[in-house]
Image: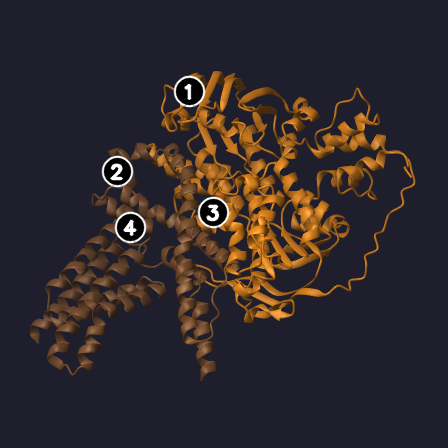
Chain colours: A orange, B brown
Amino acid sequence: MTQIKIENLSYSYPGSKDKVLKQIHLEIEKGEFIAIVGNNGCGKSTLCKVLNGLIPHFIPGNFEGSALIDGLDTKMVDVGILSKAVGYVYQDFENQIVRPTVLDDASYACLNYGMVDYLKKGREALSMCGLNDKEADYVFQLSGGQLHLLALAGAVALGPDILILDEPIAQLDPAHAMIIYEVLKKLNQEYNKTIIVIEHHTEYIAEYCSHVILMDAGKIKWKLPVKEAMVRVEELKRSNIYPPQVTQAAFRLKELGIYPWNKNLPITAREAVRSFCALLPEKERKKVFITKEEQNSTECIRFEQVEVTYRSVKGEAKTVFDKLNIKIHAGEHIALIGTNGAGKSTFMKLLTGLIKPKSGAVYIQGRATRKLKTEDLAREIAYVYQNPEEMFIKDSIRNDIAYAMQVRNVEQWERKTEELLEKFHLTSLAERDGRLLSGGQMRRASLAIGIALNPSILLLDEPTANLDIATRKEIMRTLTEMKEVTDTVLIATHDMQLVSEWADRIIVLSNGKVVADGSRESIFSDEMLLKKTGIQPPEIYQVAKQMNQSLECFNLEEFYDLFLEEVV
Amino acid sequence: MEKFMNKLSESILDKFSMDFLRNQVLKNAYGNDDTMIAKMDPRILLVWYLYFALVPWFSDDVVFLIGCFLLVAVTTILAKVAGLVLCLFILGVFSQTGYLFLVTFLFGGDGSSVFPLLVLTVKVATVSLASITVFSGLDPDRLSNGLMWFGCPERLSFSIAYAYRILPMLMEEFQNVLLSFRLRGNPPKQTGVISKIKYLAYQIQVLIHSFYPLMLNTAKRSRTTVEALEIKGYRYAANNKIIKKMKLAQLKVQVDDLLFLVLSFLWVSIVVLISTLI
């Protein structure tokens, strides 16, 4: 049954002549699980807002053509009726939660539309989203993943048959991301809801979605079943979408004449292992042991029996770290990983001197942070937040980058600012306010601000979160370039591709303890550890490992090498 | 001695961090939802409040005033109000009348001038503590429902509940913006007395500058919130009497509420009785 039917739809925002959507034709059947992919700014979110009637009812503008939901023309019915047919979860979902307690928020829409059993409906929605035991909690007590589920529950409570989610897992660690998608799968299969996600993570698309829509510059290029869509590697890459690593690998191997030309490309790890195994040439594989150079570089950070507690709103103070010990040497590139709430941000804030340990001490270049002010540490340490908006304290990017140098009278700060703008490709945006830039530009600007004082230690909190894959690659390139400029860098991240391509030491935090500390080889091959901490190595690593326990590939190039004849 | 002073000022500054403020505000908003006051019917409490917010102004009877003061002091303790709020209360009362009291005393004022000031101080204190009991002890959501029952516009009551929802987010953001200034700014050195004043001036300047990014960030956030409210039918419900009735149906007067009223009434009667006997 056709549930959504869009005909000849064009739309431009009020006051703008550029059409964001151009002559869209689209049909969506009931029960489909659809991913919309496309470049940033290609009209994905706008299309979704047409479906829930915000456009044209709440956001006017030039609307041509028609959109029918269950036969209802969205132009004719109001947002209230449509919101019972279409649920929407925003990318910045925490801003759509408007009530202080969980059940209250989940049932709020039902109450507003005058449903007598609104509490029952709210409870049902919470249990569908796996939050039934959180009913009485305050919203600020929830973790990031739970907040997202609550936003979803708020949409589900009205009983819509269609659910739209804008980048549901952008800010979540893999374990929480999986929970979200499992909930969506349940809603799709058990409750027969049509699900539409805007998503950049093709691994999740391949695993969970049934269809893919590719958008480009306001047009729909095609809508295809997921298996057909993901194998169009070149076309997707042209739109800056990167198919799952296994698909990319098989595509490349096909080009090299290794993968059979008439065989379909795999899109999930499961399929891939089977087809790759048969192709693996029998050759002597010497396990390359990279002998680590003796660590004789100087120590720059030392945690000694650090204990940190947080004041909690109710009852006992919460212990974040209990007797934490760690040493970091100058020149190391460290990835700090662990689930949401494992203590990564606290770790970084200890280094900035913002949080002081309750007992024990943190030493930076031999000086204890307890005696120092954050301002005194700023020369040694730069901290780039997860949320770049909070770093923009001046009215333009140029002033933001210049600020720290200017107030310290750094010699030739004007020239240095220009150089930084140049280096991070920001010269043309220099006069804009940081907040108004796109995600990738904001991130670049925040990095430039961070390294302006030439710190010896750089702390980055989730530098690749919330970015589409193309922008993420760009940031990763920038980080690699920066390796030469900066000395010691510490990145807190969930992004395992970044970890495996960039870091030379990995520290795993879990419940405020360092549970592992070592090279990527030692961390990713420790199955017990992975299970315990919910870390998921990059897909290509997992596939190689499943093919043969002795294989380790950290990126696609290493994977191709497995299949190539010995090259001298 | 100097060492001691340094240590003292350090520990006070440490306590008075943004983190501490945030914690206190949150504690005040959410931390006392299991107290007797929080569980009461907001309408009863508002009626009770009306009495103790108005009547003390019209009475000059010291016994009666002190009696009222004792009662609201007890309810404040029952409401488990956060320390910071109490601190502000004491500071507030002092700045209103308390200092006059001191000044009069210093400049040789006698009992006759002190007495009216004492009466005024007790009045202000009583009314303030009654306000603290109701507005801080009551759950914000229940408070807003109570106000709505008395005919306050839906918009006001929604704003109260929503303010408490975004407060933790705003505080955290403010903290991070301030940290940006601390990480990148270059405050004056604190050596002599003058430079200490300069340092203070710098800090105040930073606080003012921090509001600009905070406001812009909030404006950016609110776009989603406004759209979400539209989807959730906020506007639809605001003009609908039946839905208002549904919202207020949660309010129920219980035995405890009546008991609270009766006990307060009894106490006031006893106090009035005593004051007439004297």
Q: Identify which residue, A536 or A111, lies in the foreground.
A: A536
* Among the two numbered marks 2 and 4 on one chain, the one whose residue lies closer to the N terminus: 4
Q: Secondary structure at mark 3?
A: helix
Task: Locate residue A168, reporting x and y percent.
Answer: 54, 37
Q: Is residue A97 visible?
A: no
Residue at the disc numbered 2: B245
Q: Which mark is residue B143?
A: 4
Q: Secondary structure at mark 1?
A: strand
Amino acid identity at mark 4: Leu
Quadrant of res B24: bottom left
CB atoms at circles 1 and 4 under 8 Å apart?
no
Q: Chain of mark 4?
A: B
Q: Chain of mark 3?
A: A
Mark 2 or 4: the one toward you: 4
Residue density around tag 2, few if under 14, some if 14–19, many if 20 or more, within 10 Å: few
Amino acid identity at mark 2: Lys
Residue at the disc numbered 3: A134
Mark 1 or 2: the one toward you: 1
Q: CA distance from mark 2 to mark 3?
A: 27 Å
Task: Locate residue A494, reporting x and y percent.
Answer: 63, 46
Q: Quarter of the image containing the C terminus of chain A?
A: top right
Amino acid identity at mark 3: Lys
Residue at the disc numbered 1: A63
- Quick check: B47 left or right of B210? left
Amino acid identity at mark 1: Phe
Q: Is residue B43 visible?
A: yes
Residue density around tag 1, few if under 14, some if 14–19, many if 20 or more, within 10 Å: some
Q: Residue at x 30, y 34 (%)?
A: B237
Q: Residue at x 43, y 74 (%)?
A: B9
Q: Which mark is residue B240?
A: none
CB atoms at circles 3 and 1 under 8 Å apart?
no
